[in-house]
Image: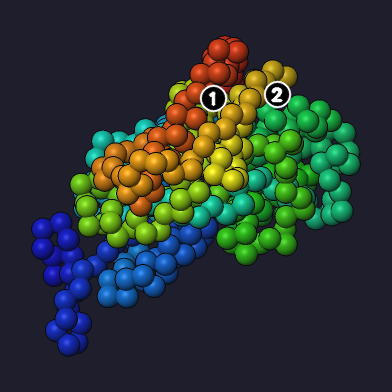
Amino acid sequence: MEEGPYKYIRDGNGKVSRVIRIGTRKSQLARIQTDSVADKLKELYPDVHLEIVAMSTTGDIILDRALSKIGEKSLFTKELENALERNEVDLVIHSLKDLPTSLPAGFTIGAVLKRENPHDAVVLHPSNTGKTLDTLPEKSVIGTSSLRRAAQLKKRFPHLEFKDIRGNLNTRLKKLDEKDDFAAIILAAAGLKRMGWENRISMVLEPEDCMYAVGQGALAVEVRARDADILEMVSVLHDPDTVLRCIAERAFLKQLEGGCSVPVAVHTQVKDSQLYLTGAVYSLDGSQSIKETMQTSIAPGNKNLERVDEQVQRVGVTAIKVPAEAQDAAEQLGVKLADLLLSKGAKEILTVARQLNDAR
């Protein structure tokens, strides 16, 4: 049964329940991530009927060019958002790092789930088992599609070479294993873990070697901002610490005007009611970088602790279950840190990185 934009089904006993349609990319990892969110929703709302709708995105289809060269901000999200706009789906599951810091009008991130390990991982070619990035031979080729990873690792491991590798996790691991083009590839530890491939991780890169991407390791649920009932339904999935860390990271990136085509990296931590944010920008070859750390208190003040702004979006996130003052503090922390980096010359580094990348 269709009624307005919504879909309902009637079971054998004549009971009617609403169908919630969840949009996702078709890749195996996207499906695993979506199923994990659907399972949580099923547990919380046993009466709701969930339906998963899988589709291909531009980023899944264009595999012969580096991500940073395609020049489209929402490579992995646009088709899903179009379906959301047309009421073909009610919510969409993304890797948060794929979502731009400004969402199209009418959309919001209604939930940010507890973050998996946000760090990057090294996966060695089977012939290099037992080695580390330090001990790989001179001029070994490392595969990564990320300017952020390449810039940091070039500086830290000058004896290595870095080349683009595209495709979903399965494709990239296959390219690594079946050919001798790469000595190792760098992937997000979270994706490998969710796929059940933790045994392939040779080493997890610590922040001093390679800081991670904004939002890396966290899953986001995107919804139509006007759907108060869906927003309420998914808001129970929010993990407050992850929300605050990711708001700070996204505010930092937005203030820097960074995106896929520039090397920007972060590291965040919540400890003793303090939120710590380290942010850095790099030249493409990693020779120039600016890196700083700031912190803010996210402890509840004496104000009315229940003050939660129902419809306020902060860098695309609506967190109706997280204290508003903590969200404000996180957002301001990101902006302040970005301003500090800009005052030290970050804009020049990023402008050159962008121009060099466009010219490649």
Looking at the picture, which amino acid does disc 2 mark? Gly
Quick check: can you spot residue 79?
no
- Name the residue nearer the viewer: 312 or 74: 312
Quick check: can you spot residue 170?
yes
The quarter of the rendered structure image containing the C terminus is top right
Q: Position of residue 116 (x, y in %)?
A: 57, 54
Q: Earlier in the sequence, mark 2 or mark 1?
A: 2
Identify the coloring: rainbow
In the orientation shown, which residue stands out farthest toward the bottom?
Answer: 13
Q: Where is mark 1, residue-wise?
A: 337
Q: Is disc 1 surrounded by few (<14), some (14 to 19) or many (20+) residues within 10 Å?
A: many
Q: Is residue 59 left or right of residue 178?
A: left
Q: Position of residue 55 (x, y in %)?
A: 37, 54
Residue located 31% across and 67% down the image: 51
Q: Position of residue 338 (x, y in %)?
A: 52, 23
- Name the residue nearer the viewer: 83 or 39: 39
Q: Position of residue 144 (x, y in %)?
A: 65, 39
Q: Is residue 229 left or right of residue 288?
A: left
Q: Determine the image quadrant of residue 271.
A: top right
Q: Where is mark 2, residue-wise?
A: 286
Looking at the picture, which amino acid does disc 1 mark? Leu
Rounded to the nearest angstrom, the CA distance separating label 2 from label 1 is 20 Å
Residue located 66% across and 45% down the image: 120
In the orientation shown, which residue stands out farthest toward the left?
Answer: 4
Q: Nearer the viewer, mark 2 or mark 1?
A: 1
Circle 1 SS class: helix
The quarter of the rendered structure image containing the N terminus is bottom left
Q: Determine the image quadrant of residue 165.
A: top right
- The answer to whether residue 76 is above or below residue 221 is above
